[in-house]
Amino acid sequence: MSHIPPLDPNVAAAKGFREPGDRPKRFWKAAGVAAVEGGHAVQLDGRTPKTPAGRPLVLPTAEAAARVAAEWDRQTEVIEPATMPATRLASTALDAVCLAREAVADEIAAYAGSDLICYPAEAPTSLRTRQDAEWGRWREWAAEHGIRLEPGSGIVHRPQSPEALARVKALALELDDFALTGLASLVPMYGSAVLALAVLKGALTGDQAHDLSRLDEAFQESQWGVDAEAAERTAAMRAEALEIDAWFRALGL
């Protein structure tokens, strides 16, 4: 999503890493959490670090703050941003999502308009049968939450009702900035607002939703084998999904 920087460590490395000699060095002895007005602050030797935009790193729950603090505590001689996904989520929430909530919710709703689980393959029959079975139950789950999506066929786009998309947007806007950031990061990873919402609400784990989002790829791998680079990308995406799932749970969702 345009408002949410990717969590993929490879992308982060390409865009945000400096050369090893230029990376900031660890300057603190201990990382922890302290209750403050408005939430729970990450503490480095008793002082609260700030986001890139200069906002104090204060989170809504002690568990979420502890996840961020643990990332800082795991740093060794130099700071490795790619090993700090929770810090990235928190900073994105504080610096970006809070200023663009409406736009972020619109983008999430737009994904629902062409949601992956509404487009099963036309062939082969075995894949189509599995997608119908696996994805159909999550369209039913979505309908139970007020999101009635109609399946299409193949690559032919089928517009969804304005009411369904409005419901997705409303659900997104019910979230605080931190949960909205997690949802907006997960939706494009799956290509599905429904699967991401199911993880948010605890109906699916990040791992389960990841597998559901790549039924087509898994089928192709069963037929033709697994490419090493593709397997590496898949593993990185799975790790991201698990991280965001844990982020939701740390936020008390």
Image (spheres, grey):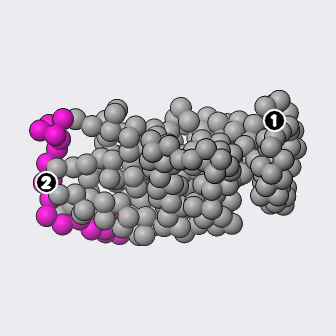
Query: Which residue is pictured at 77% across the width and 49% down the height?
Result: 127
Q: Is residue 44 left or right of residue 21?
A: right
Tag 2–tag 1 contact (CB < 8 Å)? no
Magenta span of residues: 19-41
Where in the figure is residue 82, as x and y percent of width and height? 33, 47
Residue at mark 1: 154
Query: Which residue is pictured at 81% across the width and 41% down the height?
Result: 123
Where in the figure is residue 4, as x and y percent of width and height? 50, 39
Q: Nearer the viewer, mark 2 or mark 1?
A: 1
Mark 1, Cα crowd under 10 Å, few <14 / some 14-19 / many 20+, is few
Helix, strand or loop at mark 2? loop
Query: Which residue is pictured at 38% across the width and 45% down the height?
Result: 9
Amino acid, disc 1: Gly
Q: Is residue 187 left or right of residue 97?
A: right
Say the numbered circle drawn on residue 77: 2
Where in the figure is residue 53, as x and y percent of width and height? 34, 39
CA–CA distance in space, label 2 to label 1: 51 Å
Which residue is outermost to the top?
156
**Reading the chain from its start, which is encountered first: label 2 or label 1?**
2
On the image, which quarter does residue 41 sit in?
Answer: bottom left
On the image, which quarter does residue 229 sit in?
Answer: top left
Query: Which residue is pictured at 26% across the width and 59% down the height?
Result: 72
Helix, strand or loop at mark 1? loop
Q: Let me know if residue 80 appears in the view.
A: yes
